[in-house]
Image (spheres, coloured by chain):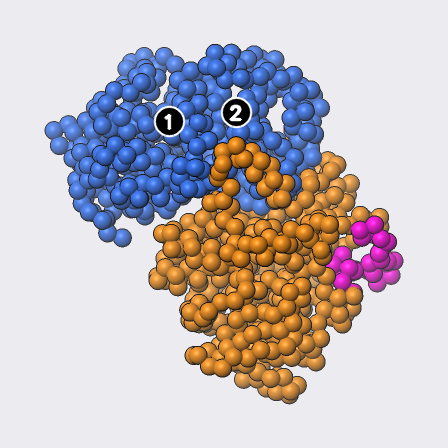
Amino acid sequence: MPLPRTTYRTVVVGGGIVGLFTALHLARSGAGPILVVDRGFLSSGASGRNGGGVRQQWETRATVRLARESVAAYRRFGREFGYNPWFRQTGYLFVAESTAELERLRTVHDLVRSEGLPSEVLGPEEVARRVEGIAPGSVVGGTYLRSDGTLYPFPAVWGVYEAVRSLGVDVVFGIEVLGVEVRDGAVAGVRTSAGAVTASSVVNAAGGWSGDLSRRAGLDVPNVATRHEILATEALKPFLDPMVVRISDGLYFSQTVRGEVVGGLTVSHRPGTASGMPSSPKFLTAMASALVGLLPRLARVRVLRAWSGFYDDTPDGLPMIGEDPRLKGFVQANGFGGHGFMLAPAATRRVAQAVLGEVTDLDPAVFSPARFLAPRAPAVAERLQLG
Amino acid sequence: MGGAPSRRFRYRGRATDARPGESLLAALSRDGLPVLERSLRYHRPRAPFCGIGQCTGCLLRVNGDPTVRSCRYLPSEEDRVDTPRGWPSVRWDVLGVLDTLFPQGIDPFRAFRRPAFAIPLYHRVVRRLSGYGPLPSGSSPGTTTPTPVVRTAEVAVVGAGASGRAVVERLVSRGIRPLLIERRTDATAVAGADLWNGVSVSFLTPPQPDQAFPFMLLGFDAAGGGVAAHARAVVVASGGYDASLLFGENDRPGVLTADAAMSLTPAQERTWFRRAIVVGGDRRVQDVLERFGHRVAAVVAPGEIRPDVVRAASERGIPLYPRSLVLRARGRSRVRGLDLQARGGGPHFSLAGDAVVLAHRRLPSAQLFPLAGARMAWHAGTGAYYPLLDPHGMTTVNGLYAVGTAAGVLESADEAAADRVSDAVAGRAEGALPPLPRVRAEGPAELEGYYRELLREPRRGRWIACRCEDVLLREVEAATRAGYRGVEVVKRYSAFGTGLCQGRYCVPDVLLLLSILEGRPTAEVGTITTRPPVFPTPLGALAELDPSTTAEAA
């Protein structure tokens, strides 16, 4: 497929939720023309492969704030974008297996409360009331925030996709960005599998492939793509409201509006995107054993399908948002560590501001790509990375 | 089996008997074709469709488990059986009114967006209406073995159909003792081979080169327990199934596949249909005529009818309608006939019949190959993907072989491949061999042309593209109109292919359809990534196979 044109003001690499939302904010600011280019098809990356969780319980204050703003955006989404993502605020329930884990959750709880969100600490009986049939003695307690929730990722992607197209943004799929053209230390364009494009700024919203893209632009970045797996079961009548997360092993699961149990668990795979996105028996059996161990009532529920996708991880567990100090016009919008969907509406506002050269309200020590260039480790880290 | 007593179970509170070897479905349908299901969105009445444990047409709640495929379930004494859907009953379902109220369908991702205050209510109502039934109570079925069954074999043969058995016999004669794995529970043993009945293989791993037995097969048995097999070589003879077809009201009770007709017990045979309209013109129609010739009212073919089928039908005085567009099934709670039009703008016909038997297209059950990493190739003649094979019948994965319908051969037993595969597995392969005769052009070589013509005709009734999720043809077309292209994208957009049949009955037709709608070859429309498990697999069975917990138990 040829490109609609060869000159743009901004090229956004990655047509997932982060790239599309960024393009939306830019187009609304009148900062066109804009090209969004994606190597796969719509929703082929993590935006079409995640478990649909949206939470505000985090270890870092800056992330809590971005998440809170995103929750508000997803609440409005159906009215604003014409698609219903079924954002359902029935809470995230973190469960702890030990008092040490519960202490850690309590710290999160204190931070979340200090941001004005009514998080609750639950004892084992209260957890059992919210997760009917949980194995006795399996948890010592947990934390719960009712305004966290789950959504269907696909309609959210379609809504933003159609919105940007109606604003005149060109969105192309099946085209790979092979390199970034640099002139006098600034972005001059990109080379793609469909030809060269001139542009004065490039947004790297390539998710699991964003490390590859930065390196193609000659920038050494610490992003690592890690494969995470997920499964879905047959649809049943409602029996579970919250998203349940176990912090010891990253087990998470929820029941969708349609009734399927959807969830994942961390099993380690070789890092990088080279191996593709297959499913492993190691995951299927470990996930099943974790689920049935925590909620024995699920033993007879059948798994319908399993799939996998990439997290784009950074060393401190926080995304990179802002212009790369080494290359003028190259704006990083990646490293979301499997949580891009839940932070995208708010985070991409700042990405667009960075593209437009405006000052953002983000603490550069936390989110700037420059933090990895300093000899010292970044000051803050987010370790509530799961799944 | 023969001497076993009848089993008495309770169906909706009433004591009912199943004869020895009789499935739950067979026991419940001696008086006629039963309506056991309501479709997910529009609550349309549904009856058994595939007969081989793949579709959602015969789901029943058995001892609390709401998605038991009754065609494959052998009832036990004291089983409690119920219909999971429909209120007040599956026959008289109040929500069936949705089917009439929304002639254009309901787009779940467009509707229910406002007003803001009503959204939590929408969520509650839609959740209540979704799903097959309540979570099964009790932690696990009493019959499940506490530990998984694990076996190791030189060669595992998946599928005890004619081709699988042909391979097994030859392997035995070459001094190998293979493990024959069969999903059905009633395969007969082959001397010199180990037979594993009632085992569904859900996963086949790519070979692990450092292992003595590089392949691992994961699955579950009839009781829902986990099973695993390790093998040095794997021969997949998983066969095939009869495809669905798109036409108006194509999900009406009484529209069923040739598989379903062929799997009927004698008692069902008497009651399910008396005047069937058979769709197709190839070998599979011959099977149906041989068995049900006296109960066939007409043969209708999308394309030409093979001369031997013409002969067989004429001998029985059955009228033939070659080169016909199937427009619509008539009847509401039961098929009463079929409306046709001769292709090329010819005359219309309205045939009377009490069943429509789909025998027009046989598709391969080939999901295990891509899971193991084998390369697949599209064959336009049958409209399906098959594994690429070398002259020995081996896929692109070393040690993984394919025979029979799964490999693209429609004969009852794939003797030619069986010889070569068993020679290769036994290390007796001769050097240069001519290529295996694979994938004949039999079947709807031009089904795409057929659909192209059909889609230009005015439509009446609901056209169901995906039975499990109640996705309409018009929704697939709407996706294309909105600019969503490619089968993976449209799958997500319209939700076809995400139901319990795991895409077996909708994906093949939608692929052809998208090729027409998007104006590009099927290969460019793409394919749906094969995702494990191959069959819906109980979490409990998978949990038993988790090495970390079994290690703890040991």
Could you tell me residue B156's position as x and y percent? 61, 53
Q: Where is residue A109 in the image (x, y as percent from the top left)?
A: 53, 15
In x, y percent, where is residue B517? 39, 61
Type of the residue with mark 1? Ala
The magenta-colored residue range is: B1-30
Residue at left 42%, top 49%? B489
Query: Which residue lies at the image location 67% right of the left edge and 79% below the top edge?
Result: B293
Question: Disc 1: which chain?
Answer: A
Residue at 50% x, 74% y: name it. B325
- Nearer to the camera, B113 or B398: B113
- The hue of chain A in the figure is blue
Nearer to me, B479 or B262: B479
Residue B418 appears in the rendering = no
| Label 2 secondary element | loop
Dot 1 alpha-carbon crowd within 10 angstroms: few under 14, some 14 to 19, many 20 or more: many
Percent from the top left, x then y, of residue B438?
48, 68
Query: Chain B shown in which color?
Result: orange
Mark 1 secondary-structure assignment: helix
